[in-house]
Image (cartoon, rainbow, N blue to C red):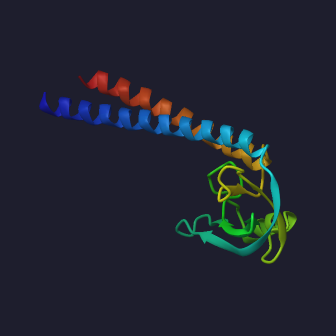
Amino acid sequence: MHDKITIAGVLFFCALVCALSASVLVWLYLMTVYNAKRHKTWPCVDGSIIKVKINCISDDGIQDQYTFELVYEYTVNNVNYTRNKLSACSMKRYFDSHEAVSRYLNNNNYREGSSVPVYFNPSSHWDAVLIKGKSPEYYECLQDYKSRIILSIFGFFLFSIMAVLFT
């Protein structure tokens, strides 16, 4: 009997973790939508890319994935700012090859020394993005959040049902 209660407790704990994960993901989803709407009204200044670095994330050699770091600088009211946020989505974008990342960076003119439009928050000038509004990255990000929310909710129900069955 003691083992059943322990297993049920662990399963309920797992259900709560899934529920908490779903809540956080819903909040991130809503913040991404909110930020994309806010960015559409932000003013634009010229900025400059000061750092571009491609990173390889190795998964035990099975399937390497690549992402990038991008840092840009811009000036508002004679004050210099440095930022690395690309868009409303806070998730990193992953690519299957180094060439795919390079192609993405080149297609968007994200090279060190390149001039880029920077959209900044008129209330907090340090808050800025390079891609405003709803870009393809935005939709990919939202789809990823939706998938994770669905999995978290499914996990919540699965662990809850298993916990009830063990009691």
Q: Is residue 132 left or right of residue 4?
A: right
The percent position of residue 91, horizontal first and vertical second, equals: 62, 52
Report the front residue among 77 and 47.
77
**Residue reaching furthest left?**
2
Which part of the image, by quadrant, shows the C terminus? top left
Residue 94 falls in which quadrant of the image?
Answer: bottom right
Q: Is residue 31 left or right of residue 51?
A: left
- For image coordinates 30% across by 22% down, the residue present is 165
- For image coordinates 43% across by 26% down, the residue present is 157
Q: Is residue 12 left or right of residue 50?
A: left
Residue 35 falls in which quadrant of the image?
Answer: top right
The percent position of residue 120, horizontal first and vertical second, equals: 73, 55
Q: Is residue 131 left or right of residue 27?
A: right
The percent position of residue 26, horizontal first and vertical second, equals: 55, 35
**Residue 1 vertical placement versus 116 (above, below):** above
Report the front residue among 162 and 138.
138
- For image coordinates 37% across by 32% down, the residue present is 15
Which part of the image, by quadrant, shows the N terminus? top left
Residue 4 falls in which quadrant of the image?
Answer: top left
The percent position of residue 74, horizontal first and vertical second, equals: 75, 67
Q: How many marks?
A: 0
Report the front residue among 159 and 43.
43
**Residue 28 vertical placement versus 4 (above, below):** below
